[in-house]
Image (spheres, rainbow, N blue to C red):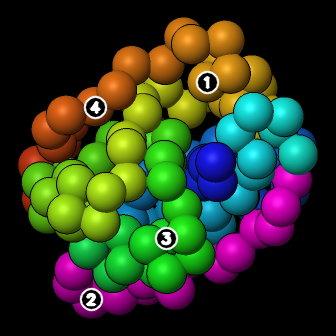
Amino acid sequence: MKLAICAQGEGLEAPADQRFGRCPYFVIVEAETGELLKSISNSAMAATGGAGPQSARQLSQEGIEAVVVGHVGPNAAAALKAAGITVYGGVTGTVKQTWQQFHEGQLPVLDEATVDSHHGIS
């Protein structure tokens, strides 16, 4: 299964990012092994609106089945659900540390938004 982890940079040692639609990168790993598949730039990061749904579409096109986030807004949560992507909460530390927690079953599934719309806009 392909797992995307919101990150501030590329690779397994990159710091995880709390934001979904506005995170700079998605680091894609094999969920069972933690093997790095690739890092992709979030094409919606600088969008003036709709960053969450655009990011969900990007992940869907990459064949992502689950994503680990810190926070997810209502539009992103709805778009991820519609795309069949399971959302887990709890990014902490590095991408590798976040994957480890995912792999050990320590991260909760998020069934709804955790923040209001436009939360990640700086």
**What residue sits 74% from the left and 22% below the top?**
100
| Residue for badge 2 | 48
Res. 59 mark:
3
Secondary element at image label 1: helix
Q: Earlier in the sequence, mark 2 or mark 3?
A: 2
Secondary element at image label 3: helix
Give how far apart the Cα atoms at labels 2 and 3 are.
19 Å
Give how far apart the Cα atoms at labels 4 and 2 are.
25 Å
Which of discs 2 and 3 lies nearer the camera? The answer is 3
Image spot of residue 42 (x, y percent): 55, 76
**Residue type at the position of mark 1:** Phe
Dot 1 and dot 2 residues touching (CB under 8 Å): no
| Residue for badge 1 | 102
Give how far apart the Cα atoms at labels 3 and 1 are.
18 Å
Q: Is residue 93 visible?
A: no
Image spot of residue 88 (x, y percent): 42, 33
Image spot of residue 74 (x, y percent): 12, 54
Identify the magenta region: 36-52
